[in-house]
Image (cartoon, coloured by chain):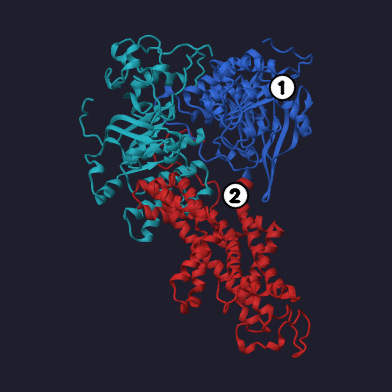
Amino acid sequence: MAPPPLSPNDAPLLRVRGLRIEFPTRRGTLVAIDDVSFDVARGEVLGMVGESGAGKSLTGAAIIGLLEPPGRIAGGEILLHGRPIHALPPAEMRRIRGRHISMVFQDPLTSLNPLLTVGDQIVETILTHKPIGEQAARRRAVELLEEVGIPAPDQRIDHYPHQFSGGMRQRVVIALALCADPELIIADEPTTALDVSVQAQIIALLRRLCREHHTAVILVTHDMGVIAETADRVAVMYAGRIAEIGPVREVVKQPQHPYTRGLMGSIPVLGAGSRRLVQIDGAMPRLTAIPSGCAFHPRCGEAFARCREERPELLAAGHARAACWLYAGDNAAERAR
Amino acid sequence: MNAPPVTPLLQVEDLRCTFDVSKPWLNRLIEGEPRRSLKAVDGVSFDITRGETFALVGESGCGKSTVARLVVGLYQPDGGRIVFDGEDPAQLDAARRQKLRRRFQMIFQDPYASLNPRWRVDRIIAEPIRVFGLMREDAQIRRRVAELLTLVGLSPADGTRYPHEFSGGQRQRICIARALANNPEFLVCDEPTSALDVSVQAQILNLMKDLQDEFGLTYLFISHDLAVVRHMANRVGVMYLGRLVEIADSRTLFEQARHPYTRMLLATIPDISMSGQARPAAQGEVPNPITPPPGCTFHPRCALADERCRREPPQLLPAGPARHAACHAVQEGRDAAPALRHDTD
Amino acid sequence: MNTQPHNRATPAVPPDEPVHTPSLLARMLDSDLWHSFVRSPVTVVSAVVALLYVLAALCAPLISPQNPFDPATLDLMEAFTPPLQANAFSGRTFWLGTDAQGRDIFSAILYGSRVSLLVGVAAVSFAALLGIGLGLMSGYLGGWVDALIMRIADIQLSFPAILIALLIFGVFKGIVPPELQDRVALYVLIVAIGLSDWVQYARTVRSSTMAEKNKEYVQAARVIGVPAPLILLRHILPNVMGPVLVIATIGLALAIILESTLSFLGVGVPPTQPSLGTLIRVGQDFLFSGEWWIVLFPGLALLILALSVNLLGDWLRDALNPKLR
């Protein structure tokens, strides 16, 4: 497949600016995502990593317009090709979904309709988005299944989801996401429900498809290993904010934000034997009690007065950007330490 | 297996467990289907020495959790023996079995399901103390619960709260406190951190190591995560479809795995050090355990499989120092070739 | 962050919130259940109505103008007095009129509600106890015990509840000597309604028990050798009671209606202790001779009672269902 022609302006494919997501509850409004900004370039794999409750899945859901009520976008903007899509009416958003942005969920079993053959589901999706006939759509469906590595696709196309194994089912879901040649795929924990030996296959598949189709991917996961293998850039989220964002190699090998450093150190590594793991004491704050200033300061060994009072912006830190006052200009001395 | 110099704390010999997965009687009658059974554990033997951590690792459905549940008596084996410190619980009368139970405990995977949501934390932790009749007076029990809470890094005041008020990591600490309440020597840990975030996992793994050092605990550690197993275990058994395929010292296993399945598992771990080396991708998926392949059950995914592998199930035999492997290729010395077919993915 | 290796078994992890244990009342007023309750006006109204009803029935001897079952207080001359009209002979006025024996309908309803509520509550308790017990055993033990209990339940479910109750009543009439029948009729009615209704408790409890028994907190108790009866009682039972509460509330309305139906058919409580159903049966004789109030008011009373309890049950079902929250 040839990559789609680049549009004349060199703006990023997706631009998220100051995104804020709120959940009104009877005990007050919870701010689940607070002032999150990032770009996704064409054909790029952006990893979004964080622990449960960090807001990584919510960010993905907001971009594709599938935020579960009562959650709502309370501020900021999401621009696709420079065009705001965060406040589109549902009908228009549906056209964007699938055609421009599609989604791969964690559990392949629940994202397929168990009563329809996989072929029916793929053909239906193709027909929704493309002006082609049913025969052509079916041929395209077989091609897609072959592309995602399903053996004997011309027979498997008439099978029902339960006749596929977990890994094969996730391949079908990926084929479904590719139906309309979207420019962006949001993959929310696509390997979490799979066995370890199958995870690696799915990661390799995602990488290859993204390269061949020149499709951008936002890969939402809690697994730093998957990010290291797959992503070009990574955004580390903490308590609804981006703690650090940068090229994956830099962030993984030389994390700058104290949280990222702790996170990387807490991952058991094969080569390291049984040394004691680095431990970040405490737990991520609940949304009801996000600390003032930098949300990480109560758990941070390097916090100082400013961290408690003032929320840090993303500041240049090495080759990445980190939301940490250690990297403010007047803290150069601290940084040198 | 060569006899270790000291008597092991736990000996598992030729353990077998089969589950009936047939449809209900009426359905079988009408649809004319035979009974179907699943050999969850199919002849597993291993020893655990006092003070060590023995890990069982494998993909879902390999039977590792079933072994854990057989060891603590949650399931009854269909064959084989479990001997704990020279005593076989199956041979004991109820009173002596209960006395033996006091010496082991279990930690479960899901910290959200392993605490009774209607019980206060102090009651949860005190349950083993009361069941085994270790203490009679309420004040004494209260002191012990406070001590246990402190031991696992919680505050004694947390005892008055309910499980839903705690995060996943804190709940797992409560589970550990409950497991330590009857001063066990042996802990069976079934995926104790796989439901937790990595930073919380680090806290729990560190805590478990500290407790092992402090109380001389012996662990049977079940996990699907090889990096966690490498971090925790002294010895490792790799399971595939109900059988042990390789068993070795942790170091030996992770540095020079010999069984093709172990090598495949090791190759699937995402490379977090970003060495940039291309890894051979794993092939295929675990087959349905109700209808496992004949011969060596791994042969459909194995690049080294030959006629013998398809026909004859391999035995777990010594394969070098401190290592046993169940593989014809290893025994025949033809495992030097790359064990994995390279995939285009 | 703590990068220093330390050898103590107690990493310093402060609890993330200060510990305070609020009082039971404070916890209740802050619970999701209470909030969903006060946010639903229909539920509040039905709760108030049901509560007033129960209070009125309990205090019937104190608030009713006459004791409708004491023949000494009845005056045949006051028979068939329409509501809110003065009786031609005694000049007394009755809110809801009187019946053929000069009995005040309002008082009769209050006393009748006592019987209806008593039978309803007792029958539901009996059915719930039986159903919970059998459901727990069925779900926890499985195997042939489960098969046996569930087949009995299936067979019973293929008959309408009223048929079962009638059948039990028929058997009772056959074996109890006639002079005792009036005295024990109330208890037989309770047993008959209870036996016709245990199945849904058993089924619900069985399926919840099967889900709970595989949860790890139950396994943790089994690992330390807690005997099965204690596991059922202390661990599983408290965790399966939510759905039972819902069924019991809706079941109360159904039991009251079933009791009225049986009494209406003449097989229920003896005429000396009329329930709402008995009042309706007696009243319908006069429907076509123009004395509409004799049947209308007991009917309305039954409707209001059943409706308010039912609405409460509906709300409870929705409030306890996590999927609808």
Chain ID for label 1?
A
Mark 2: which secondary structure? loop
Contact flag, marks 2 and 1 (Cβ < 8 Å): no
The correct choice, above or below, for A74 with respect to A336 in the image is below
Residue placed at 42% from the left, 43% from the top? C10
Disc 2 versus disc 1: distance between alpha carbons?
38 Å
Residue B311 seen in this snapshot = yes
Give coordinates of residue C273: x percent, y percent: 57, 77
Residue placed at 70% from the left, 25% from the top? A98
Give coordinates of residue C99: x percent, y percent: 69, 80
Task: Tell me what hue chain B is rendered in.
Answer: cyan
Kindly indicate whether the residues beneath marks 2 and 1 are on one polypeptide chain. no
Structural crowding at the residue carrying mark 1, measured as other residues with C-alpha within 10 Å and reported as few (<14), some (14–19) or many (≥20): some
Q: Which residue is mark 2?
A: C321
Chain ID for label 2?
C
In the rendered view, does A72 fall on the left or right side of A252?
A: right
Mark 1: which secondary structure? helix
The correct choice, above or below, for B319 with respect to C84 in the image is above
Task: Tell me what hue chain C is rendered in.
Answer: red
Q: Which residue is mark 1?
A: A127
Which one is nearer the viewer's eye here, B276 or A262?
Answer: B276
